[in-house]
Image (cartoon, rainbow, N blue to C red):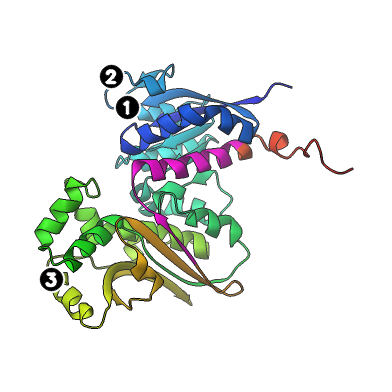
Amino acid sequence: MAPVEVRLGLIGCGTVGSAFAASFAERRAALESITSTRLRLTRVAVLRPNLRDPRLAPAPLTDDAASIAADPRIDIVIEASGAPNAADWIRTALDRGAAVVTANKQALARDPALLAALATRTSRLHCEGAVAAAVPIVRALRESLAGEEIHALRGVLNGTTTYVLGRLEQQRPFAEAVTDAQRDGFAERDPIDDLSGADAAAKLAILCSLAWREPITVDQIRVRGIDATVVDTIDAAREYGGRVRLVASARRNGRVHAAVEPVVLDADDPLAAGTGVHNVVEVRTALAGTLTWHGAGAGGRSTASALIADTIAAARAHTPSVNNRPYAGALR
């Protein structure tokens, strides 16, 4: 029996999208073996279709992302653009029955309908790369902890601020610390989303919606970022060995209370261990106790790892009859 063909459409081919395309091209045979399907990248939306990237051949290029979202021939839409209107494309694809894999945290966190889809935990919307890149916290909340009661969660979810705070611990001036982050590729030319806490708040909104199965938008999160005044707090914390990190935290007590703010942590706090652009996430549960995840939370390759994993999950869900077959060597 010939494998089922699953058609993919890619929107965006910047840092994350190109890393996904390269990984998909390199590992396509292995991914097809894992999913028992034939995976085909059928169309790609890029800003400049005239600039052919050999990693995308022979997929046709277009500058019309909306047409990929609406194309009934495409089974899985991988949205890696970071575009402000990406929520429209995601909704279009979902409405016509396609699966969507996205790394666009802001598109999700500001859209109650998309957060509600995530809250069902069984939707065709996959977003591991939108929260902590390669750290599999979305899948853990959606699947591994599906039967758990989540009491609280907290995390260091923004690698840029951790990098900047680390430089400040080395007594570098704030402006220089931000410039260093930009030079090393850990901060955007305009780092306002990172420094203001907006990036971490969007990620926290997604985690809250998954943990408590209700849409929690960024408007419901109290947010305070970092600026040059945080240096005084870092100096005070240094007196007793503490560290300052931008912490995203949430708990449920009748309703969800969520905040993003700089916090002084004890040196032995798991969240204080994060350095560079590593993310740390801690979840407190009723049965399993407190669980902690940490790893690379930024970068094209680590985010591409999450997109690949979500694509595998979406392809398996698209062909359940194929992927639910018993193993050939199963006991009879």
Our reading of the magenta stretch's main secondary structure is helix
Residue 137: percent from left, percent from top: 48, 57
Dot 1 or dot 2: first in sequence order is: 1
Magenta residue span:
292-315
**Magenta segment includes 276:** no
Dot 1 or dot 3: first in sequence order is: 1
Any part of residue 262 in sight: no
Q: Which mark is residue 46?
A: 1
> Mark 1 and mark 2: span between their CA atoms?
9 Å
Residue at 52% x, 62% y is 213
Q: Which mark is residue 51?
A: 2
Residue type marked 1: Val
Q: Closest to the observer: 86 or 195?
A: 195
Residue type marked 3: Thr
Q: Quadrant of the C terminus?
A: top right
How crowded pointer 2 is (Cα within 10 Å; few <14, some 14-19, many 20+) is rated as few
User: Given this view, does label 1 or label 2 mark the residue nearer the observer?
Assistant: 2
Say if mark 1 contacts mark 2, CB within 8 Å.
yes
Residue 156: percent from left, percent from top: 35, 64
Q: Closest to the observer: 144 or 105?
A: 144
> Mark 2 and mark 3: span between their CA atoms?
45 Å
Residue 272: percent from left, percent from top: 34, 70
Residue at 47% x, 28% y is 26
Q: Closest to the observer: 70 or 247?
A: 247
Residue type marked 2: Leu
Residue 321: percent from left, percent from top: 72, 35
In this rendering, would 59 be left or right of 291?
Answer: left
Residue at 33% x, 78% y is 266
Dot 2 or dot 3: first in sequence order is: 2
According to the picture, the residue beneath numbered tag 3 turns out to be 229
* Secondary structure of the residue carrying numbered label 3: loop
